[in-house]
Amino acid sequence: MSEPELAHAGLNLGNTGALTQDQAENAIFGFWIFLMSDAVIFALLFATYGTMIASTVGGPTPASEFKLLPAFVETLLLLTSSATFGRATIAMKYDEPRRVLFGWLGTTLGLGLVFLALEANDFATMFAHGAYPMRSGFLSSFFALVGLHGLHVAVACFWLVVMVAQVCAYGLDARVRINLLRLGLFWHLLDIVWIAIFSVVYLQGNIG
Amino acid sequence: MTVSVPLWPAMLGRFGWQDLPFVRAWENPTISEIIGAFAGALVVVGAVVVAALLTRYGKWRYLWTEWLTSLDHKKIGIMYIVVAFVMLSRALVEAVLMRMQQAVAIENPGFLSPDHFGQLFSTHGSIMIFFMAMPFLTGMINYVLPLQIGARDMAFPWANSIALWLMIGAAGLMMASLVVGEFSTGGWSGYPPYTERAFSPGVGVDYWIWAVALGSVGSTMAGINIACTVYKLRAPGMRFMRMQMFAWTSLCTSILMIFAMPPLTVATLLLALDRYLGFHFFTNDLGGNMMNYANMFWLFGHPEVYILILPAFGVYSEVVSTFSTKDLYGYTSLVIATMAIAVLSFTVWVHHFFTMGQSANVNAAFGIATMTIGVPTGVKIYDWIWTMFRGEVRFTVPMLYALAFMMTFVLGGFTGIILAMPPLDYLVHNTLFLVAHFHNMLIPGLLYGMLAGYQYWFPKAFGFRLDERWGRIAFTCWVVGFYLAFFPLYVLGASGMARRTQAIFEPSFRPWLYVAGVGAFVLLAALTSLGIQLWVSIRDRAKTRAEAGDPWDGRGLEWSVSAPPPEYNFAVLPLIDGRNPFYDHKHDKGQPDPYASPAAYEDIVVPKGSATSVVIGLAAAVAAFGLIWEIWGLTIVALQVIVAAVVLRSLGRDQHRTIPAAEVAREHEAWLTRVRATPAIPRQLETAGVNRGLAEIVA
Amino acid sequence: MSDRTRELRTYAIGYGLSLVLTVAAFAMVRWPSFGAREIFGGVLALGLVQMAVQFRCFLHISLKRSSRHDLQLILFSTLIIALMVSGTLVILFNLRGRMMG
């Protein structure tokens, strides 16, 4: 049953009534549960990576492939995009002008796309070295893990574009607000998964 | 294992004439091939007959608007169970074929080729778990849960429909494999490296991967839906400790679904990456590690068996309490036991591969954990027995299933404790002993539970009762058939007979295999009896109408509404003041009359039907079909259709309709009038024709 | 301080802390001052702290009543993930140790 107070930050529904408040809580909790099931998928890919990091079969190794600087830049890009999305959420919640909301959403999208471009570039460089997924178990597990994360970021970017279309079509009605919040959860969680990726994959690969 | 010559790669991918079972049977008319062709023909003929009947009776529009596109949890629940029964029929026939082969093929080749036998045990297992058991329990939870917790629907009706259609699409892939191509011979568990391209280059394993992957996504969605429903949609006053036990087991089942399905999705998708893109997760060479697969598969596989059993436990709690005319004994212990089972089920998975090579210490730790998980189940059995003790026990069909379960399941549980000890498991791993054990858990556990639930809630869903006599006949056949078919397997397994064997070379196994073969036919008779029961019940439904909605003097809220319930379940959402509010209000003169007219009615908002969910589920299956046959264009188009459907749905705004208060009032008052005119009957007469759905309250 | 200012501050603190934790982790690896084990442990610890910071500042998970269900869910998920990942690593490393060659 719902609490009388505001159940989720960022969800200023104004006078849209108790029914929508319940629906919002429902929708957001359901999305949290989905995110947790997604987290389990990533966790298993991490575990797989952990068991296959040594399966280099005389081919490329973490030390030979993972460069610190690109990983650092990508981390900053994604982290900043997470913060800019948060700023966009505040713009939505406090009814700031539409162009402010679009500005912050656009910045988030831009940062996300640059992240993807850099990552694609990284992959291309690795392929050029002969470090492609079919080369070894280690590389298979790397590309599955980081590739799946990249795929999620791409989906989030697409979703962001759809959200802008929704705002244009319907304004910030209850459903659009709930959807923006869910996208926010998704975006923040992808940054949290990236923390694990840069720690376990890129940093671990460069130790010793 | 056939790899045919592609006919037209640009449009049909790797399809060739040899992929049709009819062509194979024509070119090589062995009994094995003819059976395969017959099965394929049956699928085609079946589809044509259904389409013809729908056209003949002009029911296409009705089917589409009232059922297929419906977002109503009750309709979705019924559709799930219909699919479950259809797939049960197929998988049971496959079992009969395998039993016949094993009875016949003792020092002779039998009538099924090794490849065909391999496909049979793979489809049998995959169908029974993913397309019989999961839909059956998901459907049952879908139907009953919102009614029990006083909600109007599940938390996410559209996602509910998508989950259903993903499952239907995946089941469609299973059926398609009978008509075009072949199925995997790698078992329901699909272990690599046998299931890698190197050893299984045909389409079979691909059918398996995508059917299971789609099913697993659907089940994850269903789990999310169920958990959110229980957390957020309980009626006012229904605290967690006031829920019915079926609602508790539904919650714990959903938690297992949410966390156990992802490992399966990962395992199958990584295998797909190996097969399609040449990755090396589980290959023999270049750093692959097949043991990773076994570990990941059973991270899913163990909680999966608890997903299968917990809803059945929930049904038994309801049934035993109702038909013992007594409140459940030890409600709190039942709740704690359920939660303990849910958590512990994530700590025992290694017992499925004790022999894979881990050290004795690792095995011992998991062996101890496995034995521990037997304890909460034991607590439940005792609770049910104590519920019956000094109760007024009525031996209706659901209660008969519950009693048979208690006795038979416990025997299987003992063999589970045997298997939990690594040194003993080493002797019987992958023998028929194991096969006997898990069927001993699944049939008396899951299947009897689902059949009991089917019998118990059928009058609620359809407004008339199932025939009791044919129910008894079916029950007898299920029990006798189970013992005959599976107890000999314990002896055979302990004697060393391996599982999944197409030919036997030990003549002393013969008598046991004969008995098991007879048992399979008795089970087939049981299934047939259920079919006859349904036909007789529909034919005689005028005599067993139960529109008042409470034929068994039930406890839960689901019995407080009409049978069938209105689309919105409750005219007025109930206020909950105890653990058995409906029962207490019926039986306690001081409580408000549960059949009193409400003070006021309100408009009710319900979701409209949606075609997008049907499109998404079926398009996913089409995309998978494209991947299986390497018709890449088909896959790309289907994926775009899915994205478009999701975006379209998100941009839609006219997705609900309002039922005005006056209409709600009219429907509800009409039902209340019927209830007041219904004679209340004592429990002794509940299976007789006079039971019109209203129980007599004895002071 | 208005709600809006408070929220802006929370995001800013989250961002700032995350930056510091990220730079610290990268610095530990770029300019190693300890053994490999300690560095990896440090990196993981910094990562976990940063995850907690982001859960708190960006995702608004706290001990408040309103986020109680979410917190329960996250803790339970963490338990299951810990069981699955640690179990997998223990078993697979045990198997590797027992393989020949």
Image (spheres, coloured by chain):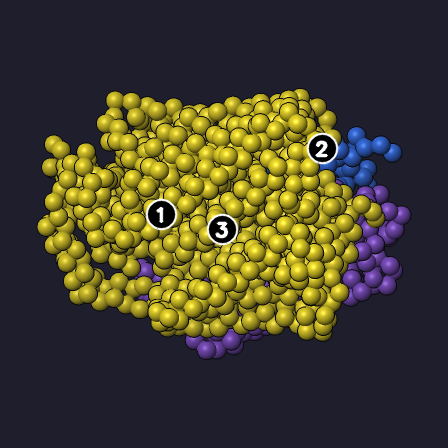
Chain colours: A purple, B yellow, C blue
Q: Position of residue B290 (x, y in %)?
A: 74, 42
Residue B325's tag is none
State the SS at label 3: helix
Q: Residue flagged by tag 1: what amino acid is it?
A: Ile
Mark 3 or mark 2, which has the lower sequence index? 3
Looking at the rendered image, the disc whose residue lies closer to the viewer, 3 or 2, is: 3
State the SS at label 1: helix
Q: Chain of mark 3?
A: B
Q: Measuring 70% from the left and 62% from the top, which residue is drawn there?
A: B18
Above or below C101: residue B23? below
Image quadrant where residue B516 sits: top right
Above or below C82: residue C60? below
Whether residue B564 is visible to the viewer of this picture, yes or no, is yes
User: A168 or B216, which lies in front?
Assistant: B216
Whether residue A41 is visible to the viewer of this picture, yes or no, is no
Dot 3, how many residues are within 10 Å of its Cα: few (below 14), some (14-19), or many (20+)?
A: many
User: A123 or A83, which lies in front?
Assistant: A123
Looking at the rendered image, the disc whose residue lies closer to the viewer, 1 or 3, is: 1
Dot 2, how many residues are within 10 Å of its Cα: few (below 14), some (14-19), or many (20+)?
A: some
Q: Measuring 53% from the left and 63% from the top, which residue is drawn there?
A: B44
Looking at the rendered image, the disc whose residue lies closer to the viewer, 1 or 2, is: 1
Q: Residue flagged by tag 2: what amino acid is it?
A: Met
Q: Position of residue B650 (x, y in %)?
A: 47, 69
- Identify the residue under disc 3: B87
Q: Position of residue B377 (x, y in %)?
A: 45, 28
User: B457 or B664, which lies in front?
Assistant: B457
Q: Chain of mark 2?
A: B
Mark 1 or mark 2, which has the lower sequence index? 2
- Identify the residue under disc 2: B356
Q: Measuring 25% from the left and 66% from the top, which residue is drawn there?
A: B659
Above or below B615: residue B353? above
Residue B532's tag is 1
